[in-house]
Image (cartoon, rainbow, N blue to C red):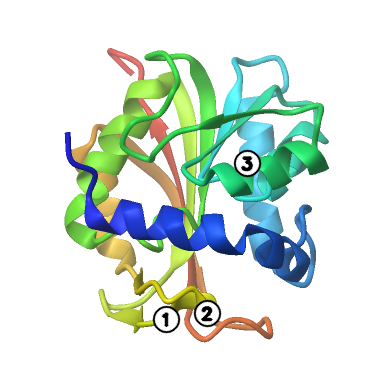
Amino acid sequence: MTEPDHVSRTRAVYDATAGTYAQLVGTEVSAAFEGPLDRAFLAAFVELVGVAAAPVADVGCGTGRVAAFLAGRGLDVVGVDLSAAMLTVARDAHPHIRFEEGQLTALPLPEGSLGGAVCWYSIIHTPPEHLDEVFVELRRVLSADGHLLVAFQAGDGDCAHRGDAYGTGISLTSYRHLPDDVARSLVAAGLQVRARAVREPELDHESSPQAFILARRVAPGG
């Protein structure tokens, strides 16, 4: 099956820039790139899932920053990313964590195998019309009552197009999703929205509001 163009372009850009990205953003969650509210949502996810639950996934893990945050708090974590170069950086930085190559719409994980998943800015290159497919796949890998945390740049559905993304010569589009649309897509995929927040840009690298949604796969009869 032919790979969607936005997936191919995203992989190519991050394969070409993995080392530079790691130098810029790092391999750990930090106050320079996550505000207090951001870290609070990650901490809430850890508490909701519980350390004795099934494994959790950092989906679109990049350099493994969120995977390391979760593992450091006692969770059994697997990181998934479509960029082989990013995964090399993640494995070097966090050799105690398992990392696998996979796409948001084709995760290398069995059905119902996860107690939770974090999608931390992983949908920023996903066109709005593909969100339903992403969330259906995330629901597939969650166990009954499994939790999902999604973080993304918020907007009214607008996008920023770079003709030469990060000096790679490859064009790449970033989407600022409307939080209501993301919530509707989660519900359409069979997930229940439990909490949501939008904060104004406050960190040096931010130019748009940041959105966070916690959702849950409801057990039959739940």
The residue that disc 1 covers is 164
Report helix, strand or loop for mark 1. Answer: loop
On screen, residue 90 versus residue 150, left or right, reads right
Placement of 204 over or under 176, stated as above or below: below
Q: Are marks 2 and 1 in contact (CB under 8 Å)?
A: yes
Placement of the N terminus among the 4 image quadrants: top left
* Residues packed near mark 2 inside 10 Å, few (<14), some (14 to 19) or many (20 plus): few
**Can residue 70 be spotted in the picture?**
yes
Q: Residue 127, percent across and down?
A: 25, 61
Label placed on residue 167: 2
Q: Residue furthest front?
A: 169
On screen, residue 15 versus residue 178, left or right, reads right
Label placed on residue 18: none
Tell me which label, 3 or 1, sits earlier in the chain: 3
Residue in front for this viewpoint, 16 or 205 = 16
Report helix, strand or loop for mark 2. Answer: helix
- Tag 2: amino acid: Gly
